[in-house]
Amino acid sequence: MRSADLIELWRGGQRESLHCGDAVICDTRGVVEAWGRPGQIVFPRSSCKMIQALPLVESGAADAAGLTDRHLALACASHSGARMHVDAVDQWLRDLDLAEHDLRCGCHMPQDRDENRRLTCGDESPSQLHNNCSGKHAGFLTLNRHLRGGAEYVDPNHPVQQAVKAAFEDVTGEVSPGYGIDGCSAPNWSCSLAGLGRAMAAFADPPDDARGRAMRRLRDAMRTHPELVAGEGRACTILMRAASGHVAAKTGAEAVFVAILPGQGLGIALKVTDGGTRAAEAAITALLVHLGVLEANHPAVGRFLTDPIRNWRGIVTGEMRTAPGFPA
Amino acid sequence: MRSADLIELWRGGQRESLHCGDAVICDTRGVVEAWGRPGQIVFPRSSCKMIQALPLVESGAADAAGLTDRHLALACASHSGARMHVDAVDQWLRDLDLAEHDLRCGCHMPQDRDENRRLTCGDESPSQLHNNCSGKHAGFLTLNRHLRGGAEYVDPNHPVQQAVKAAFEDVTGEVSPGYGIDGCSAPNWSCSLAGLGRAMAAFADPPDDARGRAMRRLRDAMRTHPELVAGEGRACTILMRAASGHVAAKTGAEAVFVAILPGQGLGIALKVTDGGTRAAEAAITALLVHLGVLEANHPAVGRFLTDPIRNWRGIVTGEMRTAPGFPA
């Protein structure tokens, strides 16, 4: 089986570039609709943060620490490192009597324009709080407090990561072929795209047990606080707002995108083979329109898929298109 | 025929992403070695700036205006908008009794870190001089002075662009299927990858006529001033320096890369199907090693291809690899 053509870029009436990949729409029983290879093994990267946060909620650690929906949205976030995000994670760590140096995610410049500019022009270095994964790591530290584990909570054999692995294999319904180390130093377990899609369907239509209640809480925290899950100008935030709360959507590095559609009991998972973010954003937009949770004429659809492409002088130079057959 | 697997990204012992594309090595008679589809039609984008500069030199316009090798390198450049580039183009326009407002390339923030920071922190807007194509456009204006054309020199029917089209079809040996409008508003004519590769071979092994002398001058200007063709930290500049003057290399948007190897009379042209720049840079690096003009253990090869990939804490998370069979 081969990957599917997903997103094309056209210029002057000629196709200039093409992104291939794989995509599935699942319900809790399995694949409902697919393009390319549902069995393709992928690293979900940040797209599975809501899975990585399951042990935090299920264990009771989140309640014991008094976490709110805002904390849970940040635990599922790849945030922009805006002051809003940085200050919230900072306070979260203080509430745990911990500090920035307890994080193990590393430092990078924030995507948020204002904060990036503040650091750049003030000759300041970013801290680990600016790391887009700092909320996930604050969640790991909260679970770690509960599990009384050691300080090196990103070690794949650490109780925190073993709990994450167990939850991940449970909800994907697969034994993972293995892990890679993510940009934030945490292990990231791989699975099939169908497994990831089924897991998203479970978040959409959760069982009536402790696991299901944790799923419901996490996905609803994401939908309620789209600005915490990513940030202004970012695809996850814009798409969740555009879907008026009907979708929890999450991107992952190397062009993974997932979505949870509670109203329909469906989950989406896709990966663009080449890791091109523009195509992952366009493809998830196309699938959300396909499933009727985004209006085709919504500005968000224009932004990520249908608006003409313009150059520095505003002249139309081309367009993005879904490839023939994607979606159906 | 299908595109070839070119560049892979691995993490935790699993292949995470894959870039496909097409690549040719040509001499002046045609394709010597190929991966994927030599007949694939591509927009060369900025990779053909040395072709777009041929009429400037051949017509005598460059000499009439007293242009030096530094001007010609800038005419072939996608520069970083560093002060060095901006000031040189500014002076060039002044020497023609023209000014920034005569350009038609549009404004964008410069890639050069220092200049970008100066503008950002000083609340200044970039000018058209910062546009990475401003040198090419100064070349167009110089040719236009000679041709006595109108002000709208980026119009596809303008004498400047018609001269460019004629040169382009001549050196590629093809009738172009058509043009697209480039990011800088100039028309960009498409051709087959083999045609682009043959054109690069002609620059490597030019005929002994006015066209050939123009080719030699332009490619040598590029090799002599790699810092003007792109800028510090950029692939073209780093690879040309690493090849110690044996190569003129030029990137184009949407992951095109070409190289001229005068010592061997060879030209290279490649396009990554998905437009991913990281893969185009890795693939041209692999081909330059393959042809013996870059040492496999040179730091530039590490930077664009063989160095382990590290995360924000310096931990090795994966690696880039050439796909099996690329290069041979």
Image: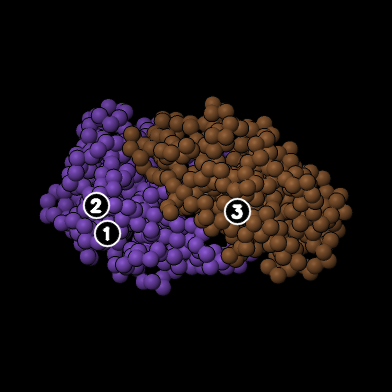
Chain colours: A purple, B brown
Q: Badge 3 local density, few (<14 within 10 Å), some, or many (20+)?
A: many
Q: Position of residue B211 (x, y in %)?
A: 76, 51
Q: Is residue A235 left or right of residue A60?
A: right
Whether residue B262 is situated above or below residue A218 in the rendered picture: above
**How far is the residue under mark 3 from the one under mark 2?**
42 Å
Q: What is the number of the mark on residue A224? A: none
Residue at which label 1 appears: A34
Q: Chain of mark 1?
A: A
Residue at which label 2 appears: A194
Q: Is residue B280 left or right of residue A216?
A: right
Query: Residue at (25%, 49%) from the top-left corner?
Result: A39
Image marks 2 and 1: residues in contact by CB distance under 8 Å: yes
Query: Residue at (62%, 44%) from the top-left corner?
Result: B27
Q: Position of residue B65 (x, y in %)?
A: 86, 53
Q: Position of residue B325 (x, y in %)?
A: 43, 39
Q: Quick one: SS at disc 2?
A: helix
Most foreground residue, B76 or A304: B76
- Name the amino acid, label 3: Gly
Residue at which label 3 appears: B195
Q: Quick one: SS at disc 1?
A: strand
